[in-house]
Amino acid sequence: MDKTQKYKDITKRYILFLIGLFIASMGVAFSTKAGLGTSPVASVPYSVSLVSSIFSFGGWLNLLSVIQIAIQIMVLKGKCNYVEIFIQTVLAFIYGYLTNFSCYLIRNLSADTYIIQFVYMLAGCFILAFGIWIQLKGNVAMLPGEAMNRAISKVSGRRYENIKIFFDVLYIALSAVICLVFIGKLEGVREGSIIAAVLVGNIIKLYEMIFKNIKQKHKN
């Protein structure tokens, strides 16, 4: 592959990744609109922000990103791509702006009944999973949380989707413990958070299975 072709390939991959990033932000926006609990990865920073005013919710979210990046470096050791680490840091901020924009796009949607809230929550899970799946197909950079899952998956040999489910459940559990210990009640963690923790990783598996089946049919 010559330099021109390589440049075009990398450009296509980043475009695919950015599309996935925007779709994922739409998934978060629908989950937020549902009002049935924060997303698993945001649950811990949100809970900590309720009991400590050292940082804002966004500040604690950025701190979690730093921790996730540090875990990647420790897990990958000499194989760590520091250029990608830098890109992840930048993308973490871009993702925040995209999420705000996505919330703005659906600002006029109403969630007056529990059924509508539940539908929005499910839609958010499917959209978020699709966005993450597209980012994986781009195979360039990822957000710190997803990149950490991918790094652990590569080193351990376990499926990425299973690693994601494990950490999503862990985030929800930690958030619940923080709230119950320091506040005495659950805040920001509801049925939507628990469903998302279990569902999103499995939906990614479903998308991958469908993709492989379609790809196999085209070969035949």
Image (cartoon, rainbow, N blue to C red):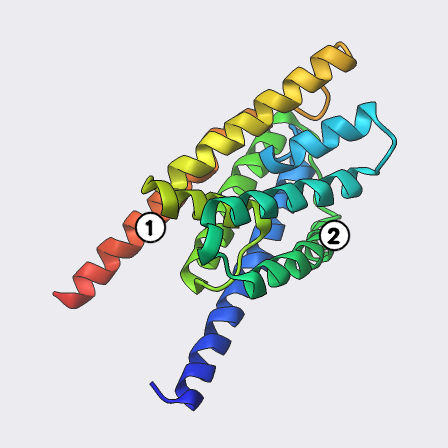
Give residue 1's position: percent from left, percent from top: 33, 85
Give residue 91's position: percent from left, percent from top: 64, 59
Give residue 73's position: percent from left, percent from top: 54, 49
Q: Residues within 10 Å of mark 1 (few under 14, many from 20)?
A: some
Residue 27 in sight from this viewpoint: no
Residue at 75% x, 53% y: name it.
Answer: 104
Question: Relative to 113, is 147 above or below?
Answer: below
Question: What amino acid is at disc 2?
Answer: Asn
Give residue 22's position: percent from left, percent from top: 60, 58
Left or right, residue 13 beside residue 100? left
Question: What amino acid is at disc 1?
Answer: Glu
Residue 208, numbered label: 1
Residue 19, numbered label: none
User: Label 2 vs label 1: CA separation?
Assistant: 28 Å
Q: Looking at the image, which residue sits at the far front? A: 78
Left or right, residue 53 beside residue 48? right
Image quadrant of residue 101?
bottom right
Question: Relative to 152, is 79 above or below?
Answer: below
- Total numbered labels placed on residues in the image: 2
Left or right, residue 143 beside residue 4? right
Image quadrant of residue 68?
top right
Query: Residue 125 versus residue 96: which sits nearer the camera?
Result: 96
Element marked by disc 1 = helix
Element marked by disc 2 = helix
Determine which residue is flagged by label 2: 100
Residue at 65% x, 45% y: name it.
Answer: 65
Residue at 77% x, 14% y: name it.
Answer: 182
Residue at 64% x, 41% y: name it.
Answer: 67
Q: Residues within 10 Å of mark 2 (few under 14, many from 20)?
A: some
Residue 208 in sight from this viewpoint: yes
Q: Looking at the image, which residue sits at the far right? A: 53
